[in-house]
Image: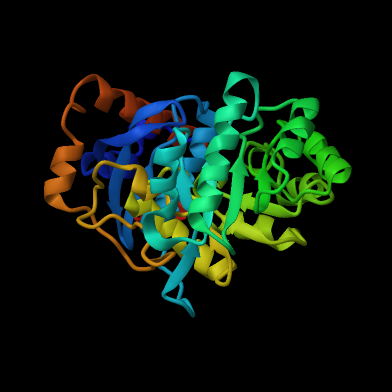
């Protein structure tokens, strides 16, 4: 195991690192601020920002991605932009329309809970978005594994008539999602069953195959572009490359993965619209349904704004977490990218 505090590579990386705290326009994934660490490497910037509810073992994958992001030479691409979906948070129907139409996207990803007292609100939101987007639009309904199998069957039936592209992780287990797919005939995408798995690419593919029509791959929590590509190569289904509520620095990296793996797809990369401001001068938000691909750097003025209130406890928290994750990576080959 690598001792991060004694490793000169960690010390050098942290010395020039910046802890950021970005406000969101609305509560999303239970948070109102997005925190993390930015650092510069030999080929760009890295972003380390695992969510607070991810343990260190899982968060170490985020660090691996951040190192790869900053120290790997970008590969050449055949395209300079990718199509993306808009993002619709948990909100009322009128506000949902604004979110869905932002950026001129033809596909909207809509967050719903699908159960209890909020089901009616979820359905109102979905119908409002569908009508506002018009003929040809598609909805991706993201449930984050919130439903039991019986609840999922009921919710899917309630959604009849809506232009659903797919239901994303309606149940917590891949097997329940597969059973729902077989019983109702709807298209199913899996996210958490892939992203939170402790198995290798082959085992993950075996879990997903037969239980889903689409694989949602999030390169940053999966450990980077190489890890994501290994999973994608094992799957006989379309892959949607998705962000993890990243700043535009991380989002630009994920967009390159999307362009390399599935340039003709429509990807889950519209989340920069959720920030009040970004660490870059111009946020990587959709225009006419696309985002452009290119290297981005932090803007000094916005980065100064993003660091307000981070000194002290927040900065110490992120230093200690990054150090623990560094140690958990052990002798991972990703460290070979960093020169001492």
Residue name at image x 70 percent, y 27 percent: 147
Residue name at image x 26 percent, y 41 percent: 276
Give the tally of numbered discs: 0
Left or right of 10 on screen, residue 68: right
Above or below, comparing residue 154 to residue 239 in the picture? above
Residue name at image x 28 percent, y 61 percent: 296
Estimate the x, y position of residue 138 in percent, counting from the top left.
60, 56
Estimate the x, y position of residue 11 in percent, counting from the top left.
28, 39
Above or below, comparing residue 328 to residue 247 in the picture? above
Above or below, comparing residue 259 to residue 308 in the picture? below
The colour scheme of the drawn protein is rainbow
Left or right of 104 on screen, residue 11: left
Task: Evaluate whether residue 178 shows in this view.
Answer: yes
Estimate the x, y position of residue 61 in percent, counting from the top left.
52, 41
Residue name at image x 52 percent, y 63 percent: 258
Residue 57 lies in quadrant? top right
Estimate the x, y position of residue 78 in percent, counting from the top left.
49, 80
| Residue furthest out toward the bottom | 78
Of residue 130 and residue 331, the one placed in the foreground of this image is 130
Of residue 98 and residue 73, the one placed in the foreground of this image is 98
Task: Evaluate whether residue 333 shows in this view.
Answer: no
Residue 240 lies in quadrant? bottom right
| Residue furthest out toward the right | 183
């Amino acid at each position: 195991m690598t001792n991060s505090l004694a490793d000169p590579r960690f010390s050098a990386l942290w010395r020039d690192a910046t802890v950021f705290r970005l406000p969101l326009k609305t509560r999303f994934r239970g948070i109102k601020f997005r925190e993390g660490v930015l650092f510069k490497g030999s080929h760009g910037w890295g972003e380390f920002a695992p969510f607070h509810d991810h343990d260190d073992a899982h968060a170490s994958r985020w660090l691996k991605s951040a190192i790869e992001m900053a120290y790997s030479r970008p590969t050449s691409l055949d395209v300079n932009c990718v199509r993306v979906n808009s993002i619709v948070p948990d909100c009322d129907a009128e506000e949902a329309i604004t979110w869905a139409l932002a950026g001129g996207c033809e596909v909207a990803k809509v967050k719903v809970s699908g159960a209890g007292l909020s089901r009616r609100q979820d359905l109102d939101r979905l119908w409002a978005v569908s009508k506002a987007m018009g003929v040809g639009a598609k909805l991706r309904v993201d449930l984050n594994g919130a439903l039991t199998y019986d609840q999922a069957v009921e919710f899917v039936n309630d959604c009849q008539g809506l232009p659903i592209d797919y239901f994303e992780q309606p149940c917590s287990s891949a097997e329940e999602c597969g059973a729902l797919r077989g019983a109702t005939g709807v298209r199913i995408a899996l996210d958490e069953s892939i992203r939170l798995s402790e198995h290798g690419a082959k085992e993950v593919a075996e879990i997903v195959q037969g239980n889903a029509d689409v694989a949602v791959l999030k390169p940053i929590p999966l450990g980077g572009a190489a890890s994501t590509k290994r999973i994608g190569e094992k799957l006989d289904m379309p892959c949607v490359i998705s962000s993890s509520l990243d700043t535009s620095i991380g989002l630009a990296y994920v967009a390159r993965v999307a362009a390399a793996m599935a340039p003709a797809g429509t990807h889950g990369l519209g989340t920069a619209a959720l920030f009040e401001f970004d660490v870059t001068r111009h946020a990587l938000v959709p225009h006419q349904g696309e985002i452009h691909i290119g290297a981005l750097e932090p803007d000094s003025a916005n980065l100064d704004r993003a660091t307000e209130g981070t000194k002290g406890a927040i900065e110490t928290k992120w230093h200690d977490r990054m150090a623990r994750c560094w140690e958990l990576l052990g002798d991972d080959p990703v460290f070979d990218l960093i020169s001492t």
